[in-house]
Amino acid sequence: MQSIYQQHLGERFQDLHPKIQERFAINSQDGICAFGRGVMEEIWHGRWYTLPFLRIGTLRNIMFPEIGKSVAFTIENYAWRDSFGRETVSWIRSFHFPKRSRRFDATMIYSDERECIVDYLGNQQHLAVDIHMSVAENGGVAIKSGEQRFYFRRMGFRYPMFFSGVAEVCEWYDDDADCFRIKVSVGNPYWGPLFGYRGSFQVEYQSLDERQFPSHVFPLKEEIRE
């Protein structure tokens, strides 16, 4: 079975570094989960007026206002089929600051209708973001976010970019250091840089049945609208 990332990239998936292919090939049928552990060399945020938005993000495990260097980091990737039958992959990122830990949760699906990955940010899938992936020159995955939509109960609307941000992400494998590296930057054309981090991590794979997944992997609610 193809993963959602193989569906999105098609033949270009084979141009990824083998370690990146392995990491982005997990699917609900292979029973393989990925666990990463490492250090974020730097976590930053934009100017003072970005802080209220980042603090609001902590209520749904999206973004956070803390900054730091050499911050311990973990990431968990599980694949399953959600209650609507869609192939789904979790991204549970934890940042362990000296005084508290913060989470940045997301669940991703592939949308045939939108012809891209849809990334539901947070633990209640209120915010759906189009994700466009490509192969970076270093063999990594290059990601850029697109249109964003907000869903709450019966309400749904396209989220105005004036109040949001565009994420650019690159994850690649460093053969010399024998580790994965990642760089994330979120910015707004009106407000400037908002949030980001960069660092490295190692990944281990385990065979787990969905019944063995910890409860924090699953969103508190699922949204059918893409």
Image (cartoon, rainbow, N blue to C red):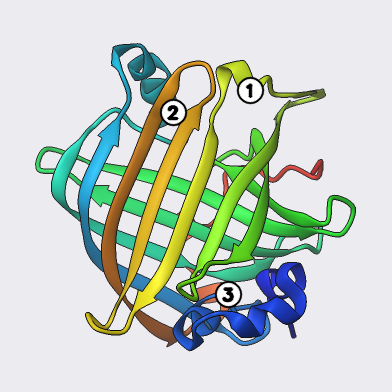
Residue 181: x and y in percent read: 33, 66
Q: On the picture, is 100 further left or further right than 102?
A: left
Left or right of 32 in this view: 12: right
Question: Which residue is label 1 attached to?
Answer: 161
Q: Measure the alpha-carbon separation of dots 1 and 3.
A: 36 Å
Residue 57: image tag: 2
**Amino acid at dot 3:** Glu
Name the residue: 78% across, 62% down.
86
Name the residue beneath numbered marker 3. 210
- Residue 222 position (above or below residue 10): above
Front position in the image: 54 or 178: 178
Picture coordinates of residue 3, whole percent (x, y): 68, 76
Under mark 2, the amino acid is Gly
In the rendered image, the vertical position of residue 127 relative to residue 207, given as above or below: above
Tell me where residue 5 sits by quadrant.
Answer: bottom right
The residue sitting at 49% across, 83% down in the picture is 17
Where residue 199 sits in the image (x, y, percent)? 26, 58
Badge 2 element: helix
Please state, as top left, top right, bottom left or bottom right, where the C terminus lies in the image.
top right
10 Å neighbourhood of mark 2: few (<14), some, or many (≥20)? some
CA–CA distance in space, label 3 to label 2 = 28 Å
Comparing 86 with 23, the one in front is 23
